Image (cartoon, rainbow, N blue to C red):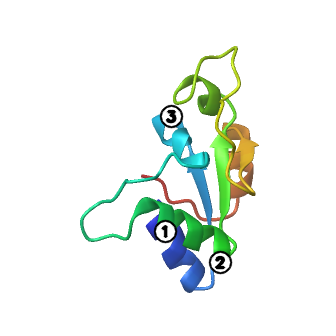
């Protein structure tokens, strides 16, 4: 997702990465340390580059608490990435109306 977002930004398009389900964990500092996929830069580097070029990060308003870092009644103990915002499916639908959305 971050690689795709970087490509979109490089092409002059706005990009928003919506982190949902277990992927919401990537919206917190230190969560991507040591994570790399063959053929891609380390995830920490992708996230940093994506943020530096103005890419937005939305954390699922439910998933960021229930899928990755605790439970529905607890706040995650890790600090959220600078600039990461909460958003839900209504936020994503609003952003996608009359626009283009790519999900994977």
Is residue 34 shown to the viewer in this render?
Answer: yes
Q: Which residue is mark 2?
A: 53
| Residue situated in front as seen by the camera: 64 or 98 | 64
Label 2 with label 3: CB-CB less than 8 Å:
no
What secondary structure is found at the residue carrying circle 3?
A: helix
For disc 1, the marked residue is 45
- Residue nearest the observer in this picture, 93 or 80: 80
Task: Give the CA separation, mark 2 to mark 3.
Answer: 25 Å
Q: Position of residue 22 (x, y in %)?
A: 47, 35
**Sequence-wise, which precedes: disc 1 or disc 2?**
1
* Residue beneath disc 3: 21
Q: Nearer the viewer, residue 58 or 38?
A: 38
The residue depicted at 65 percent of the width and 55 percent of the height is: 57
> Distance between the Cα atoms at labels 1 and 2?
12 Å
Label 1 CA crowd tier, 10 Å (few <14, some 14–19, many 20+):
some
Q: Position of residue 6 (x, y in %)?
A: 52, 74
Q: Earlier in the sequence, mark 2 or mark 3?
A: 3
> Mark 2 against mark 3, which lies toward the viewer?
2
């Amino acid at each position: 997702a971050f690689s795709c977002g970087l490509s979109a930004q490089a092409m002059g398009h706005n990009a928003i990465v919506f982190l949902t389900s277990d992927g919401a964990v990537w919206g917190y500092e230190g969560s991507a340390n040591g994570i790399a996929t063959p053929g891609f830069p380390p995830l920490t580097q992708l996230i940093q580059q994506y943020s530096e070029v103005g890419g937005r990060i939305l954390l699922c308003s439910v998933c960021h608490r229930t899928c990755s870092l605790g439970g529905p009644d607890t706040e995650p103990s890790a600090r959220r990435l600078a600039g990461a915002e909460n958003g839900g499916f209504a936020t994503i639908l609003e952003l996608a109306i009359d626009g283009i959305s790519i999900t994977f």
